[in-house]
Amino acid sequence: MGPCRLTDETQKGVCGASRDLVAARNLLRMVAAGTASHCGHAQHILDFTGGVLPAGHIPEGGPGSQFLEISEALHQTSMGVGADPAELLKRCLKLSALDGLCGLSLATSLEDGHFGKPAAKKGKLNLSCLKTGQVNIAIHGHEPLLVEALAREAARHRDVNLVGVCCTGASLLSTLGVPLAAAFTLQEDVVATGIVEALVVDSQCIMPSLPDLCECFHTRLITTSELARLPGALHLPARSRREAASMARKAVEAARRNKKNRSAGAEKEFNDRVEKAKEAVVGFCEDNINVERIAGRLRTGALKGIIGAVGCVNPRAEAAGWIDAFRELSADHVILTTGCMAFELGRRGLLDGERIFHMGSCVNNARIAAAFRRLADLSGRKMAEMPFLVSCPMPITEKSVSIGLFFATLGCDVHFGAPFPINPHTGAAGTLAALLGKEFASTAMFESSPAAFLRTLRSPAT
Ligand code: MSK
């Protein structure tokens, strides 16, 4: 009796659950968690900005009904409730579509209302964005509530250098051009430089190791979200614009006071080790990538397709192999990228704004969906008839899974690398494929090897 992990299709749990049921349940729980993260993110921005819902973002059941859907998914997957894998998988797809509407797209619209739409610009990436001669403040997470106030406050002090980390950093880079020091896997390296006076975190993808790590250095850890409190951190909640301005002042003060605690050898060590900053072209969205030109090049065959390279990077996976694969594919595909994948491409100098476009943070995958929609409309075709693929090569978070399946519900083919969100050899994966094909004319590919992925994309049948 538990844990529900069946490895053989002939086995059943003591309760009678089959392997397909367990696989479908696990996938639905993952999608529910991913959808909750994005919808929660959007709701927090909505609350922060005064609660006015932009047009086009009301789910069928009315405002807030997405949260009931998430709750129903958790109920349906609890012991002794839903026992038909197909029904659970249908809910996976319904929730993923809701994630797109009430999570990614709503959060992106609200961020656009808050910061304005991004404009193409030059940006800088990697740890060299930190400055030994200045007070360094890094802001990390996903929900950019405090950031505008913090950027304004930082700009008032010539000795303060603000950098971003992870997806809050990707949003800041796209909108305000603030340099991006690191993504998820390298967040600890930011503190370990020894020259960061304050690390301000909001929510999601914040390693629980950070409090211990900050203890080893002088970095002041500051939390801003009630959901993502960390032991020992200074808590400066930012629940409204007015509160954000005051908290930003306190965060900057705390960082400036802390510079005297920087260890004596840290600056030399940093300067000796740090690599040169990588230049990137950033700030793209559906309004400023040249969709007419791309549609024209698709028509003539100069381009074979458009690939969304999205989601996380897994230190246990062959990240460099995936980057090489996308680099190679960019010869005859346009690559639109977000989140940690965008950072990985950027730190290798590949964000050129010609073949590979930085579209922002994870929730800004809504921008990729909007660009796909425009391209399909321009081509006079349905989304499913377009050569679109969204690849999530290292989906370590549930959010990556709901993002991938959201694109599948739009009619885009989707690829997941390892860890696979569902065992592709189960009947449940077959049922998922059948549902995607019948309802959305899309496919899901599961491939953990970059070389095999490339071979599949290069095969004449693809
Ligand atoms: S940050 S969700 S590790 S992309 Fe959006 Fe990166 Fe994945 Fe977090």
Image (spheres, rainbow, N blue to C red):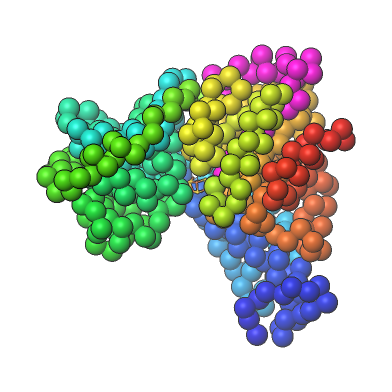
Question: In x, y percent, where is residue 173?
Answer: 40, 31
288 is within the stretch colored magenta:
yes
Does residue 104 show up magenta in the picture? no
Quarter of the picture holding the N terminus: bottom right
Q: Quadrant of the C terminus?
A: top right
**Of residues 68 and 207, which is closer to you in this image?**
207
Q: Is residue 258 visible?
A: no
The image shows residue 113 at horizontal and vertical percentages of 41, 30
Question: Which residue: 33% across, 53% down?
Answer: 225
Q: Quadrant of residue 149?
A: top left
Which residue is at the front of the view, 434 or 421?
A: 421
Q: Is residue 251 left or right of residue 48?
A: left
The quarter of the picture where residue 16 lies is bottom right
Q: Residue at x 44, y 36 (%)?
A: 170
> Which residue is at 22% across, 28% downward?
155
Q: Nearer the viewer, residue 362 or 65?
A: 362
Mark yes or no: residue 455 visible: yes
Is residue 211 placed above or below 362 in the rendered structure?
below
Stretch in magenta: 286-312
